Amino acid sequence: MVINELRLNPAHHTGLGQVLTAGGYATYFIGKWHLYANQLGHHDDPRNSFTPRGPDRLGFDDFWASYGFHHTYWDQYYHTESLEKTTIPGYEPDGQTDLAIAKLTEAAHADKPFALFLSYGTPHDPWDEENVRADALSQFAGVDFPLPPNYRAQDDPYGDQWASLSGKQRAQLPEWMRVYYAMTANLDWNLGRLLDAVEGLGLVENTVFVFTSDHGEMFGAQGRRAKNTFYDEAIRVPFLLRWPGYSHPGVNDVCLNSPDLMPTLLGLLGLPIPAEVEGMDLSQHILGEPGPEPEAALLQGMGATAIFEDGHEWRGLRTKRYTYARYRIDGSELLFDNQADPWQKENLVAHPQYLSVLNHLRGLLQKRMTELNDGFEICSWYESNWTEDRVILRTATATGTK
C-alpha cells in the first residue's frame, strides 16, 4: 500500500519561500518535497507529487526541481513544470548538487538576491549496499559498528509499526549503520562541493549557509528504530550555520526547534516575520548577541499519521538539561537528566529529589499546549477534523479551535 503524504493548505499560513519571494529574492527548490499535491490526479505513482506552479509551491516561484519522495537513489528524477520526468543519471545526491551548483552560478551573475533550498533524500533507509556509492561504503570497510549503549532487545511497547524490529532486522543493525554512515560521508563530500562553489563564485561574505536535518535514527536504541519519538537519537539533529563576519563562531546551546527556523532565518535577513509564525526569532544568538530564548523545545508526537493509527500519541519537552514526556494512552511519564544520563536509561519520574523538576515541566508542557490549542487528541481525530483527502485543511492556531 502506498501512503500519500499530507499536503498543506497554503491559505492558512505564509511560508518561508513566500516571504523570501515578497522580499525580492529569487527562490530555488531542489530535491525531496515530501508534500502531497496530487491535484492533477493521474500520476503513475502518487509519491511523484508533481506540484503545479502556483500557491502549492509555497513561494518557490523561480525554479522548482522536485518530486514527492522515494527512498532509492540511483538514476532518479525530478519534475519542473509538468508531469514529465527529468532523469538524474547516477547517484541522486551528486546530481542534485550539480544542479544546485548550476543555479548558484546563475544566481551569482543575476541582479537580485537568491535563496536556494537543497533537500537531499539520503541518509534515509533502505540501508542496502546497493543504495549508496561504493567508494563511500569502502571508507567504512572493516569498521566495527556496535549496538548503541541503550540498545534494548525487546521492542518499545509504545512504538508504532515503524518503530518495531524483527529478529532479522536486529541482526542487520551493524550493516545498516555502515550504509547510513557511508551515505552521510557522501553528503559531506557533496556539501564540500557546494561550499567550494559558494567560495569560487565570490558569494561567501553575502551568503548564509545552513545545514540541518529533520530527524535522526534510533538503530535499536530504547528498543526502537526510525523516528516518531522524543529520545535524543531521533530529535537532536545538526544545525550548522556559516556567515563569515556575522555569525558567532562556536557551539550554542539554545533550544532551537523546527518552528524557530523560519523566524530565525528571516531575522538574520532583516525580513518581516508573519504574525502567524509560532516559533521564536533566535538570530541574536547566532550573531553572538544576548536575547530571549525558549526554556524548552516542545515535542509533539501525534501518533502514526501515515496511517492514522491510534495508541502512540505523546507530548514532551527538551530543555538544556532534561527531557520530559507523557504518553496519552495510559498517562505514563518519563523524565531524564541528560547531563547525568546522556543515554536516557533511567526514568526519574519516581525519584523524590526530582519532584520539583517534574512538576515544573508538567506545568510548562501544559502551558505550551494550551497556547497552541493542543487538546492531546488521538491520532485519528486529526484525520477526521483537520484533513480531507490527506490535505491539511486547518490548524489549531489558524482556527482558534482544538
Image (cartoon, rainbow, N blue to C red):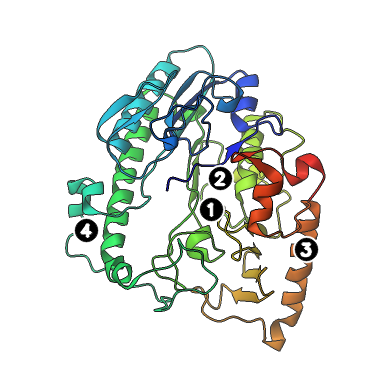
Report the disc number at residue 366. Answer: 3
Q: Nearer the viewer, mark 2 or mark 4?
A: 4
Task: State the CA–CA distance, disc 3 to disc 1.
Answer: 27 Å
Q: Earlier in the sequence, mark 2 or mark 3?
A: 2
Q: Within 10 Å of the Cα at label 1, are there few (<14), some (14-19), or many (20+) other Cα atoms? A: few
Q: Which residue position holds label 2?
A: 248
Task: State the CA–CA distance, disc 1 to disc 4.
Answer: 36 Å
Taking the view exactly as shown, the residue that stands out farthest to the top is: 111
Q: Quadrant of residue 314?
A: bottom right
> Percent from the top left, x then y, of residue 272?
71, 29
Q: Amino acid at mark 2?
A: His
Residue 280 seen: no
Q: Earlier in the sequence, mark 2 or mark 1?
A: 2
Do labels 2 and 1 touch, CB within 8 Å?
no
Q: Which residue position holds label 1?
A: 307
Q: Earlier in the sequence, mark 2 or mark 4?
A: 4
Task: Label 2: state its secondary structure.
Answer: loop
Task: State the CA–CA distance, disc 2 to disc 3.
Answer: 34 Å
Q: Amino acid at mark 4?
A: Phe
Q: Amino acid at mark 1?
A: Ile
Q: Amino acid at mark 3?
A: Gln
